[in-house]
Amino acid sequence: MKPQPGLSSGLEGGVGTEGAEGKTDEDGHEGGEMGFVEAGQLWIHSVPAEIVNSVSDAEKRRQEAINEVIYTERDFVRDMEYLRDLWVAPLKSTDIIPEQRRADFIEQVFWNVHDIIAVNTRLRDALNKRQKSYAVVETIADIFLDAVPHFGPFVSYGAHQLYGKYEFEKEKAANPAFAQFVDETERRKESRKLELNGYLTKPTTRLARYPLLLEAVLKHTPEDSPDKENIPKVVALVREFLGEVNLQTGKAENRFNLLQLDQQLVFRPGEQVDLRLKDEGRELIYKGALRRRTQGDSGELQVFLFDHALLMVKQKSKGEQYKVYRRPIPLELLFIAATDEHGNTYNPNAATVTRPGRPGKLQPRNSFPYPPAVVAKPEGGGKNAFSITFVHLGRKYYQMTLWASTFVSHRKWVESIVRQQEVMRAHSGFFDMDTLSEGFFTGVNTVTCAVPFSGGRKVVYGTGDGVYFSDLREQNKGPMKVLALTDVVQVDVLDDYGLLIVLSEGQVITFPLDALDPIDPMAGLKRAKRIASHSSFFKTGTCIGRTFVCVVKTSPLSSTIKILEPIDQNIRGRSKPTFRKLLQGGNDTLRPYKEFYIPVQSSSIHFLKTKLCVACVNGFEIIDPETLDTQGLLDPGDESLEFVRRRGDGAKPKPMAIYRIENEFLLCYDEFAFYINRNGWRSRREFMVHWEGSPTGFALHYPYVLAFEPTFVEIRNVETGSMSQVIQGNNLRCLFTDTPPSSLHHGGRQSMQSMHGAYGMPPYPVQHPNAQFGVVGGVAGRDEILMVSDDRVLTLRMALPQ
């Protein structure tokens, strides 16, 4: 290595000697305190005595501080050149590191040292030039103001330093030739008895030292000097870089630890899970030991709380490996029950929660479903104080009780989990909830169904005790009973026809809305019209431009489906009913259109634009309501759909919902969801959703599909299939959802070339963000999604934009 040239003597440039070395301790920190500086480095020894005697003591101290800034900069650049010349160059030109990984190793260990050399060489040269030009240096802040904005390489280097040290130590332990090279190089006199790690830390320590050096100059700088104003600016800029270094270093350390942990995890056969620990932004929130108390299996587990999941592992006796103890729990599906210091179990989330999408804004808990009523069953007996029961909700359900050793540890775990779940809710709030009714529908009067009507201003509820109306404009007034019926399992309203349809005790009955009287729940029964008996369910909708009511009678072996049409009330009002009609309850309200039979059990009906789609035990069937031609939805020629048709255990997936997304169809089964095209062949082969829960109902609000299961609502993006939001609750059921056709919705070609062609289902309408119970461009009030959690009825709607 070439030594730096010394300063030339003279009044203009001062008397110079070679920039002597600053002493460096074993940790790689540079010397430079005045008491430890060699004599040749002091400013008073580098300029003529008459110059020294001509300045004040304060100026002498200032010049010594400036001199320390300059010579330590020379030392730093020399140390970086030492890395370049005695480490990087030999490793590049020899076979110490195998060729196939040589370049990557050098990059990982030394990272961007060349960039730092380039930046600081320019700074060193500018400082040297200033010192050579003036025996008494008046300013240096202007040089730093020009150089510091280019300090970006320090940030990158500091963030990567941990990786470099890891690769260095790993190679040293595994490669004898490299270990010998390290030993020989560190023994050279140029190394100054300092190990490589000491030099690798110098860029970070150098950046941190600039503020100290410059503030020492500032301390002795007169008020009229430009440095008095500019040095604080330089220090502020450097500290910004230091803050970024600390931030990025923390992130890098977190990422490094996650990468190591990812390599150390050992899963049980068949239980491999991609925890996505390598994802950008992944974070370890908290970790620690919790104890098991199960019989024959006591001991500690290491528990890791990530920003997205909880992991329980057991450290293996040999090597640095962790055996995954139980399946990791996504935080959206994690429910915890904790015990206080007295051993009483409580739900940490039971008080208030942050409204989704609105960090920091608390909302009363009654604006959300009741939390899952999971019965914690602590294993091991004894005192339950400091226990936490972790519950994995959904299809992969399990619960595990672990114990903290102290109250402080227990509280820290509970707070960390609750806080991170709050963070996740706040950042995934695509749907808001509002309570429509609470505490009213209890006992035998449990709500079973509900439908908004009258433009969304009113709601009709069906219960085991009758039918109730609620006017949402009268918030202080509870639901009013309008029909005294039993076992009501389904209701719907045809607003345009002023007609209420009820399924009670297997009978489909219609009632004119104007005949229902909250004061006399028996009065409406006089205008009842029984449409069908022994019915399983009914469905209203629009197909081929006509409003239909499909009444289904199904058994394990067959289904009979009657298609009826409502009779326009104006037409019905033109002729007076006969005496016999009056005895039967007045005019007909629905007239038969068609009737057909399917030799399988059916569970639901879906209206496409020109066809009906019936969900059966064998899959989806397409029916032409005009010709009654029937054909399977899935084309039997598509072998990629065998996973739907054939199941080795004999249990077939249950078809539940179909939604048109542009020119394709999203099919939702109770286990999974996938796309098909207009010809019944699978499309978007990369798209496949496996539900976390066991859905009992579905809803669509583009671009999201909602799957309802008893303990949570699973909300996924229909374009990517990714989980967007999870809403936990107890006894959750979807009460109402609708996908009304509309001529305003455009989704590509509507023509149907064959039974497997365009099923004609219009794209689902996009709700205007400010719509309340109405819908923009659709049927007013029918875009609401209603659900129930115990006695709490809630509405789900898209969150308002921030």
Image (tube, helix red, strand yellow):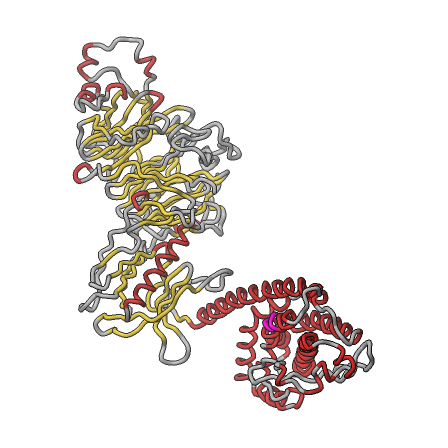
Q: Is residue 652 visible?
A: no
Q: Nearer the viewer, residue 171 or 40?
A: 40
Provide residue 47's location: percent of width, then percent of height: 77, 81
Q: Quadrant of residue 131?
A: bottom right
| Range of residues picked out in magenta | 208-212
Residue at x-position 41% and y-position 58% = 308
Does residue 218 appear left or right of residue 6 in this picture? left
Q: Nearer the viewer, residue 598 or 460?
A: 460
**Residue 435, image x, y percentages:** 31, 39
Q: 294 above or below 518? A: below
Judge from the rendering whether residue 88 lies leftward or rightward of residue 530; answer left or right: right
Question: In what quadrant of the picture does the N terminus appear?
Answer: bottom right
Q: Is residue 758 left or right of residue 418?
A: right
Q: Main secondary structure of the magenta part?
A: helix
> In the shown orientation, is residue 244 left or right of residue 655?
right
Q: Kindly identify the residue that appears in the image at 70 percent across and 83 percent down.
A: 41
Vertical placement of residue 187 versus 334, above or below: below
Residue located at (56% from left, 85% from top): 26
